[in-house]
């Protein structure tokens, strides 16, 4: 049976239910969001003369929950207009509506009896063959299926989303013995393709995979911390981005998730897993018990391990002292090995260096990994038959950049076993058997494909998706050109992909050289080129340090050359003889955005935050971005709008340094082109999707575009309008004098200069104006102050 998901009913509108509804709406699905009807009137409802039968009252809980979700930061939706796809209702009046829905997702409170009562109601109205799943994180899935009809059981399983559903990519699929295998296959595929998820097939064991291993890791850290006499600030320094974990590290993660939730999962494992060899780790330490008793549960109660306060200097974050149970200023943590490791850009090399360090940090990493490696070895096959499922779950659910078994490979399997046994822990027999068979690693890469060690058959098997995803990291044998920052990969079928590795993936001389060499090589030997990388961000923009150095030393000829080089490179992206696709993800700022603006096509990850942010550092976009926005505004003139309106919209996008909060929003900002550029929901598929588009363009007979000489600029008409607006903003004190100066330069370029009437100009004309404005601003003292602030603190100042 071919199944389509057009309409989804979400039962329960709490934190998870409302956000799951928002995510489905974000991908274009109609959603019915239901919850209970209130049993009492509020004072406001009484004052209005409403009764419990009034529709506004009956839907108050669900409507309030949805509005609360939509106000959350970061937003649960890609664009605000998708809210119109969500209908709200209540269980009393609207449960019958589920008969018209393709998938029913239960997200009510974690109480088996309540869930069963909901399913009883569902069975009254649910159409046979409709998917029915539960988002529980702790209740065994098979218990919920008991007593239900055969058709219900066949189409029922667990679908465990992680909070927030839009941003955490894990979707655990948990079948029962009754679930039809075709349903599991469908959900694994749908979650991947349409919801952008890493779908992981789990066994119906307590806490499933991610929470079982993730909460164990946190509890193990608590124990090691006490043993080594470390404090909260030190632990969060050791367990954050430096080892490829989220900024929230350990204690901040607990605050965000909810300390009560952490304790609940830990107790659940301790109570329900008597055979777990590490169950003592899940015993709640006294400090954690005290925090719960004090109701310091994290963000939801305003304080947990951290507390935000308002002082004379503004907001301050205080840290809990676990010995005195009092809050105090955060303490800067210093470890010699961490300071040295920060200079190592490659995360894998950094992790190995930290593990082998001889100071206190090194001791912590050895202890923590001994616990982690021991634990995951014993979870196969209890919670998962395959090692990659554990790694996928931790990467997608807890934001680990390197999986647990992948980390073990990095430090060495044999070395890991020695550390485990030195700590008095044990390793599962299958790991030693693996070594005895001469297999020295859990994973291997051959011919650009990644393989995992299969514990059942004792042989390597191809990683699922390895034949459909394009992972540049696995293609080290396919590099056809490189310099110290870039690699150009042959990714097959006549397509090459250029990636670069610099700090924050900024764009400097070596990256520009890489782009030009890649185009040269692609024009000579290949069918198309993709610009993509697998860093945390696509690009934070041009190398600000280089711009500051040239400007501070008044090396204006050098700076002029650098800007010309950037402009020529973006123009080559547009005017090469082969199709060029840029595939951005995450931060895509400044020069990274300008690359997107000049590509033949953009294949953007849904979570792409794209924008021209140069005004924040006292400049205007100088790599063709200002020119391109003026060009696009000119093309919109032909669509019958008032001439100044498109230009004003584009001007404000740059002047306000607007950054899209998603790839979807980038269309609204005019950065992505509707009906032309595309979005990939699952970032793992991004390069593969870009490759598909390249081949399609090549097959259709790609022809090099002709440079534009017909761009209509409005001259003084537009310039006067924009300068009036800038003056008004300055007069009202919304912007500073320097902001006004920068905006004036921007207006001058986008208007085509001081022309007495509307004229047709070339791209090169606008590029020259853009470059001149950029160079003049680079010589301003206040621009230098802004650049210096970004270099030192990562944040611009307003001067």
Image (cartoon, grey):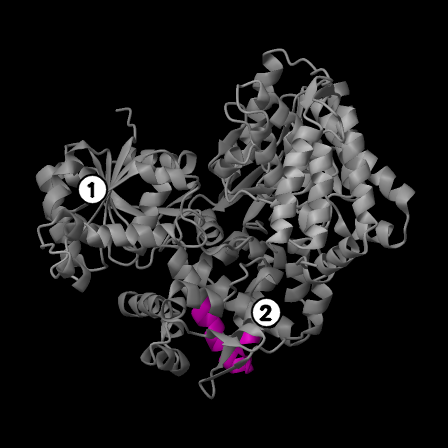
Q: Nearer the viewer, residue 744 or 513?
A: 744
Residue 546 visible in the shown view: yes
- Say which mark, if any, is on residue 237: 2
- In this view, 453 is above or below 750: below
Q: Which residues are magenta?
A: 216-233
238 or 227, nearer to the observer: 238
Q: Quadrant of the C terminus?
A: bottom right
Q: Residue at x 75, y 33 (%)?
A: 515
Residue 699 x %, y %: 59, 13
Relative placement, left or right, of 516 versus 449 is right
- Whether the magenta-drawn stretch holds residue 229 is answered as yes
Reading the image, the residue beneath label 1 is 178
Q: Report whether 376 appears left or right of 652.
A: left
Find the distance from the CA under tag 2 to the CA under tag 1.
Answer: 46 Å
Q: Is residue 719 above or below residue 362?
A: above
Residue 106 is tagged as none
x, y percent for residue 530: 65, 30
Q: Is residue 709 magenta?
A: no
The quadrant of the image that shows the N terminus is top left
């Amino acid at each position: 049976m071919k199944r389509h998901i057009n309409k989804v009913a979400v039962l329960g509108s709490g934190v998870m239910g409302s956000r799951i509804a928002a995510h489905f709406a974000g991908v274009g699905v109609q959603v019915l969001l239901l919850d209970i009807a209130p049993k009492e009137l509020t004072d406001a409802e009484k004052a209005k003369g409403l009764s419990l039968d009034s529709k506004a009252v009956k839907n108050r809980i669900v409507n309030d929950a949805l509005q609360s979700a939509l106000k959350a930061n970061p937003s649960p939706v890609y664009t605000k207009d998708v809210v119109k796809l969500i209908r709200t209702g209540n269980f009393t009046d609207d449960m019958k509506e589920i008969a018209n829905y393709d998938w029913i997702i239960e997200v009510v409170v974690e109480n088996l009896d309540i869930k069963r009562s909901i399913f009883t109601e569902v069975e009254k109205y649910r159409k046979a063959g409709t998917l029915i799943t539960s988002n529980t994180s702790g209740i065994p899935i098979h218990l919920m299926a008991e007593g239900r009809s055969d058709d219900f059981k066949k189409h029922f399983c667990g679908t465990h989303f992680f909070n927030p559903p839009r941003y955490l990519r894990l979707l655990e699929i948990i079948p029962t013995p009754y679930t039809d295998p075709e349903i599991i296959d469908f959900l694994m595929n749908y979650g991947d393709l349409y919801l952008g998820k890493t779908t992981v097939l789990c066994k119906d064991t307590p806490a499933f995979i991610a929470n079982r291993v993730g909460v164990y890791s946190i509890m193990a850290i608590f124990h090691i911390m006490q043993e080594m006499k470390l404090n909260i600030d030190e632990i969060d320094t050791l367990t954050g981005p430096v080892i490829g974990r989220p900024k929230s590290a350990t204690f901040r993660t607990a605050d965000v998730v909810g300390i009560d939730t952490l304790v609940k999962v830990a107790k659940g494992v301790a109570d329900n897993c008597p055979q777990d060899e590490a169950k003592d780790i899940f015993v709640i330490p006294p400090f954690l018990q005290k925090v719960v008793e004090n109701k310091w549960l994290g963000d939801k109660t305003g304080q947990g391990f951290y507390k935000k306060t308002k002082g004379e200097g503004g907001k301050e974050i205080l840290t809990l002292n676990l010995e005195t149970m009092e809050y105090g200023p955060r303490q800067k943590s210093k470890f010699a090995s961490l300071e040295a490791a920060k200079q190592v850009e490659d995360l894998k090399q950094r992790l190995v260096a930290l593990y082998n360090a001889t100071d206190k940090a090194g001791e912590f990493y050895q202890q923590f990994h001994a616990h982690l490696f021991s634990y995951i070895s014993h979870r196969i096959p209890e919670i998962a038959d395959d090692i990659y499922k554990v790694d996928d779950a931790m990467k997608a659910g807890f934001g680990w950049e390197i999986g647990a078994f992948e980390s073990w490979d990095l430090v060495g399997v044999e070395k890991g076993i020695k550390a485990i046994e030195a700590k008095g822990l044990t390793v599962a027999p299958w790991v030693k058997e693996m070594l005895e068979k001469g297999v020295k690693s859990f994973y291997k890469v051959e011919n650009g494909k990644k393989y995992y060690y299969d514990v059942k058959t004792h042989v390597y098997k191809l990683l699922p998706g390895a034949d459909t995803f394009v992972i540049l990291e696995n293609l080290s044998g396919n590099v056809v050109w490189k310099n110290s920052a870039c690699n150009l990969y042959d990714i097959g079928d006549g397509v090459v992909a250029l990636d670069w590795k610099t700090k924050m993936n900024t764009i400097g001389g070596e990256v520009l050289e890489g782009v030009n060499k890649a185009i040269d090589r692609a024009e000579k030997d290949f069918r198309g080129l993709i610009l993509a990388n697998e860093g945390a961000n696509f690009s934070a923009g041009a190398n600000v340090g280089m711009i500051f150095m040239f400007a501070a030393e008044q090396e204006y000829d050098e700076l002029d050359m650098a800007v010309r080089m950037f402009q020529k490179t973006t123009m080559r992206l547009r005017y090469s003889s082969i199709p060029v696709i840029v595939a951005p993800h995450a931060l895509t700022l400044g020069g990274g955005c300008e690359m997107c603006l000049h590509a033949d096509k953009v294949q953007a990850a849904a979570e792409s935050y794209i924008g021209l942010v140069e005004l924040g550092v006292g400049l205007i976009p100088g790599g063709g971005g200002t020119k391109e926005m003026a060009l696009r505004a000119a093309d919109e003139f032909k669509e019958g709008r008032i001439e100044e309106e498109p230009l004003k919209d584009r001007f404000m996008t740059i002047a306000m340094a607007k950054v899209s909060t998603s790839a979807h929003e980038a269309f609204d900002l005019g950065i992505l082109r509707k009906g032309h550029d595309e979005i990939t929901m699952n970032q793992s598929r991004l390069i593969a999707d870009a490759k598909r588009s390249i081949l399609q363009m090549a097959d259709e007979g790609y022809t090099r575009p002709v440079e534009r000489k017909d761009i209509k600029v409005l001259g003084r008409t537009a310039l006067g309008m924009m300068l009036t607006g800038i003056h008004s903003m300055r007069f009202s004190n919304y912007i500073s004098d320097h902001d006004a100066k920068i905006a004036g330069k921007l207006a001058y370029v986008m208007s085509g200069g001081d022309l007495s009437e509307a004229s047709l100009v070339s791209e090169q004309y606008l590029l020259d104006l853009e470059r001149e404005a950029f160079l003049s601003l680079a010589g301003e003292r206040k621009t230098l102050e802004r650049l210096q602030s970004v270099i030192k603190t990562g944040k611009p100042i307003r001067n």
